[in-house]
Image (cartoon, rainbow, N blue to C red):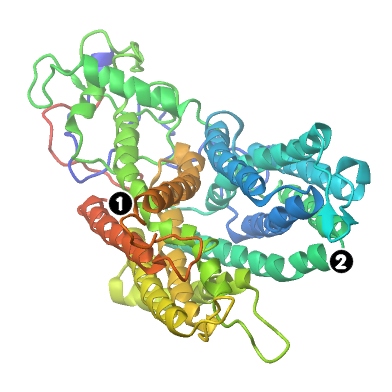
Amino acid sequence: MARDKIKNSSFFSFCFIRKLKLANPNYDQSPSSEALLPPNGDHLHRSDSSTVVQSKPGWKAVIYILGNESIEKMASYGLTINFMVYLVREYHMEQVPAANMINNWASSCFLLTVIGGSIADIYLGKFLTIALASFATLLGMLTVTLTAFVPQLRPPPCTLNGQQQQCISSTKTQLGFLIVGLCGLGLGTGGIRPCSIPFGVDQFDSATVEGRKSVTRFLNLYYAISCMVILINQSLVMYIQDSVSWALGFAIPTLLMSCAILLFFGGSKIYFYVKPEGSTFSSFAQVLVAAYKKRHLKLHNDDRVHGVFSDDDSSNGNGRRVLNKLHLSTEFSFLKKAALVVDNELKDDGSCATPSRLCSIQQVEEVIRVMKILPVSVSGVISLLALAQEPTFVVSQAMKMDRQIGPNFAIPAGSVKMMSIMTLFISLTLYDRVLQRALTKFTKCEDGIPPLRRIGIGYFFSAMCMVVAGLVEQQRRALATSQASSNGVVAMSVFWLFPQEMLLGLCEMFGVVGLLEFYNKEFPETMKSIGNSLLYLCLAGASCLSSVTVSIVHGVTGKHGRPNWLDNDINAGRLDYFYFLIAGLGVVNFFYFLFCAQGYAYKASAETVESLDESLGHPLV
């Protein structure tokens, strides 16, 4: 009977849960046995006749993933980074409708990452999701490229009538064809972005110290490559599109995307594949329902309870395989009631008979893990507000400053953000190659800096960036009111904006990359793609929050004879006050983050732990 399977051991506190040997005497403790087989037989070894274990290829496979990712980013960014100019020049759109179109498309891409990550984790797996999304991206790019090659797919060029240009707007068919291409790009982005990093992380064995160090290096390298791609696109690709040909400027990224797909499939025999685990959301719902139905039970010394339902060798009580068991928590004890076993809830073989009333303790721990991560994720929205100001008000500042380098060259106002990208690239390289090893000896942490501390440092730099931006703007505005030229440009070098841009780069290096590291290491194994999409949700949230903040400030200030902080004339406004407001929000957010991070216990694997602390008066089943 199932009740005879109850073991006389106790339950958790700060210890790990132990795998039970229910029926298989040849049980192998590897979390990847049976569940993680690739399409072929490569990278497999057998520990005995009944157990198949797949070794992880590590950097051998990651080379293909990073190569595909860098080329794909080069292609997608190269096509869209200058798209505002393309809409205005070639489609004769006004700036506001064009900006709204791009913002709506970008927001849709961010939201699609959640859907793409969910599909990957629940149904298709990361490899297949990336593959299908890559083809969607390629089709979208081909469609957009055709609008540059075929004159009939875009409005005719403007004609000069006297001293005024007469431009014909695009037809519904022409605009619809372009939107179809953008939809393809959006679907591709929604599938590739949330899956590429988790798929790379899957190639390393996180059960070893070397594997975890490799994961950190992979995340740093991933972001550094992204910086290089943006630098190349900001210079070479944008120059081709502006000065040579839109058709050639779009054709090059499209050709690169084709190469990225070939490279990605080139590693298909090497990759480590994690099978999708089924609906994670339904598992979460089961935990909540079961905990509610058992709310009257006691966790300690309840005679109605026969034990705590644990995972068997290969799957949890509802058939979902568990790759790495989670460190058992002491919080959210009311949820743990979902794992308490009462009468008639187990079959004779020890499996769950009533999923709506009984969940494995590992299912409960996954829910608790996500509930502990979400408050930290919310803090990322406000910290990214500083990034949201870079393409708008920082550019407005640069346009009213001295951008001349020599008599014949002026720095483009939009190129000021190159300093933050260069800072990010250099700091990531130094951290990965030099600082991390030194910090590991000092902090005794294999990551150099623990993820939450890294995020906190990034949040500090985010607030400092806005403080410095406000101080620089105060000085710029003071000069503008005293000695501005007729066009409002002051005799203050644009290089004064570089300190805040450097702080912004450090904010990304510590804060954004730290969030990536945190999500990929702390989310349950079955939710890595969903967890990775949270960063894009934070970006979307920061963009929306920035728009709301701008609207409120613009509507509230400027009354009773006082200047509007965000006046169209930046010299007449008080942009410095707005920066200080963002800095204040950043300080509040920093203390909120400290509150959320206090006492946070990092996830750990339970595969090597052989004992349990006494915390409940119920044995494991």
Q: Image point 51% across, 68% down: which residue?
A: 394
* Residue 566, image quadrant: bottom left
Q: Secondary structure at mark 2?
A: helix
Whether residue 208 is visible here, answered yes or no, is no
Quadrant containing the N terminus in the rendered view: top left
Q: Where 490 sits versus 554, above or below? A: below
Dot 1 or dot 2, earlier in sequence: 2
Question: Which residue lies under the disc numbered 1?
Answer: 602
* Residue 134, image quadrant: top right
Q: Decide if residue 609 is on the left or right side of residue 337.
A: right
Q: Decide if residue 556 is on the left or right side of residue 57.
A: left
Where residue 599 appears, x then y in whole percent?
20, 52
Label 2: how many residues lie within 10 Å, few (<14), some (14-19) or many (20+)?
few
Pick whichever, 509 or 362, lies toward us: 509
Q: Nearer the viewer, mark 1 or mark 2?
A: 2
Disc 1 marks a residue whose amino acid type is Tyr
Disc 2 marks a residue whose amino acid type is Val
Q: Residue furthest top?
A: 344
* Label 1 – label 2 distance at C-alpha: 52 Å
Where residue 143 appears, x then y in whole percent?
82, 42
